[in-house]
Image (spheres, rainbow, N blue to C red):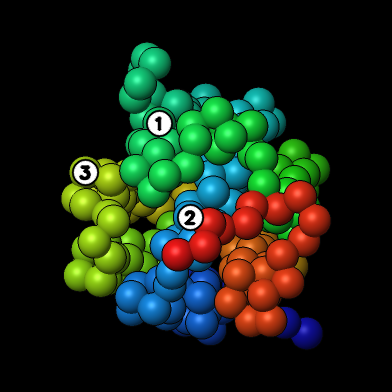
Amino acid sequence: MIALLSSEELEQRLRAVGEQRYHDKHPFHARLHGGQCTKGEVQAWALNRFVYQAHIPVKDAYLIARAGDPALRRAWRQRLIDHDGQADGEGGIERWLRLCESLGLARADVQAHRGVLPATRFAVEAYVNFVRERPLLETVASSLTELFSPKIIQNRVAGMLAHYDFVSPESLAYFTARPEQARRDVETALAYVKEHARTPAEQQAVIAALEFKCDLLWAMLDALHHAYVEPGHIPPGAFVPARA
């Protein structure tokens, strides 16, 4: 029989998931942050990650629509603003598009998801479906990868600026606002999970939800590594980097 965890113990278990499974430990990120990627690999990463970024407000809209608590809806809708902006030309999605453009990718191709890996499409669709179909408590818990993102963002910006002459602080502007936004988002989601996971089964479910999200992010990098690093099998129809 599984014992009920205290709220502090539950938080420790959730943080342990990140220590074991978060994608900052993936070999592709080691290459990206360490300056070992070719420009084509960086382009492929930015292109495929855009699909995930573009669907963040979609999954958040599903979560808001399912939430019965006005306080949760009010807190969560700030995430839509963070990514979509208050007007055209604002928000995290726009800043990610500018990153892709700075790498030499055509905006229209990125927005249309042309050349995206099949595994990326399947992973992002799985995440949206998870938020749409699983219990609300689990969908909130799946967002808690934000617990671990400030560290990876810090390493990414420092590493990419140090090693790649084709990126600049301006092109990496997406990451400027994210650490503070992530801390705010974590405060809301973690408090909700700790308050509403009231049985051992519910606590195990929220831990499993966070594991699922970490596995999904890891699988996306697996696909990138397989296609563009080793063994270099790019699927039909996927982005092919220009020869250096």
Q: How far apart are marks 3 and 2 (CA)?
A: 16 Å
Horizontal and vertical percent position of residue 187: 37, 51
According to the image, label 1 marks what residue? Answer: 94
Nearer-N-terminus badge (3/2)? 2
- Compared to 72, does 216 lie above or below? below
Q: How many marks?
A: 3
| Residue extending farthest front | 243
- Compared to 142, does 28 lie above or below? below
Give the amino acid at mark 3: Glu
Instruction: Kindly identify the residue that appears in the image at 64 percent across and 52 percent down.
Output: 239
Labelled pair 2, 1 in contact (Cβ < 8 Å): no
Q: What element carries label 1?
A: helix
Horizontal and vertical percent position of residue 242: 53, 57
Nearer-N-terminus badge (2/1)? 2
Give the amino acid at mark 1: Glu
Horizontal and vertical percent position of residue 118: 76, 54
According to the image, label 3 marks what residue? Answer: 170
Instruction: Kindly identify the residue that appears in the image at 45 percent across and 26 percent down.
Output: 84
Q: Residue 43 carries which label?
A: 2
